[in-house]
Amino acid sequence: MKIYSTIKYLTDFLAALSGLVLFSPLLIFYSFIAAAVANANPFIVQRRWVGELNGRVKIIKLRTLWPNTVVCQGGNNTVSKKIRRGGYLPFGKLMRRSGLDELPQLLNVLIGDMSIIGPRPLIYEDIETLKNSEVRLYEFRSGLKSKPGISGLWQIKRSGGFSAEEIYSFDLQYEKTKGVVTDLSLMALTLINVFSLKVLDSISEYQ
C-alpha cells in the first residue's frame, strides 16, 4: 500500500502539472471571457465533502453560470440539479460537458488536497440528501480514507441518473479495486470523456 501511495502521489503531481501547462491557454481565455461577460470572479470556491465527517476540501471551479442563477435539487435521493432561474455563460455549457470547468482543481491536486482519481466530493446539500435518505452511503462515505478526486469510477460509469445508490455502489467498487492499474485506466477514460464531450453534468435540466 505504501508503494501504491507513493506512485499515486507522483502520478497525481505529474498529471496535474502537465494538465495545467497543457490547458493554461484555454484556462486563461475562458477566465477572461467569463470575467468580462459576467462582471464577476471567473473562479468560484466551494466547500465540499466526501462525507460530512471526512474529506473536507475547498475546491476551485471555473464559473459557468450567470451570477444570479438559482439551482435547486433535482429530485429525491439524487444529487442532480435543475436550473430554476438564470442559465449558462457563453461557452459555459461546453465547459461543463467537457469537464474543463474542473481544471482549477489541478491546483488542489498539486497542494495535496485532492487526487486526480478518487471519490468525488459533494456539496453540503448533497451530503444532507444522503444523510436523510441514504444512511448506509452517508456512513460509508464518512469513513473513506481515500482523498477526494477530480474524476473517478462514478463519474465515468454512472448511468446519468445521479442516484445516491449509484454513488455508494461505485465508491465501494473503487475502494475494493483501487490500485495503480485502476487509477491509470480511469485517468485514460477521463481524458476520452473530456475530448469527446461526454462528461455528465449534474445540472440535468431546467425546471
Image (cartoon, grey):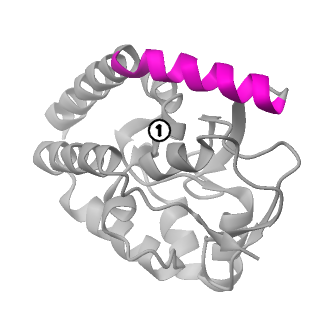
From the viewer's perspective, tell me whether residue 122 is left or right of residue 155.
right
Specify the quadrant that holds the N terminus: top left
Residue 147 image position (x, y, % from top left): 43, 42
- Residue at screen point 54% across, 39% down: 101
From the viewer's perspective, tell me whether residue 88 is left or right of residue 156.
right
- Residue at screen point 84% across, 42% down: 67
The quarter of the displayed image where residue 90 is located: top right
Residue 50 image position (x, y, % from top left): 54, 54
Specify the quadrant that holds the C terminus: bottom right
Asked if the stretch drawn in magenta spans residue 155, the answer is no
Question: Depth check: 41 or 164 in front?
Answer: 41
Residue 41 image position (x, y, % from top left): 78, 25
Q: Secondary structure at mark 1?
A: helix
- Residue at screen point 20% across, 34% down: 2
- Residue at screen point 27% across, 42% down: 191
Q: Which residue is mark 1?
A: 100
**Looking at the image, is 2 positioned above or below residue 207?**
above
* Magenta-drawn segment: 22-38
**Looking at the image, is 89 positioned above or below residue 49?**
above
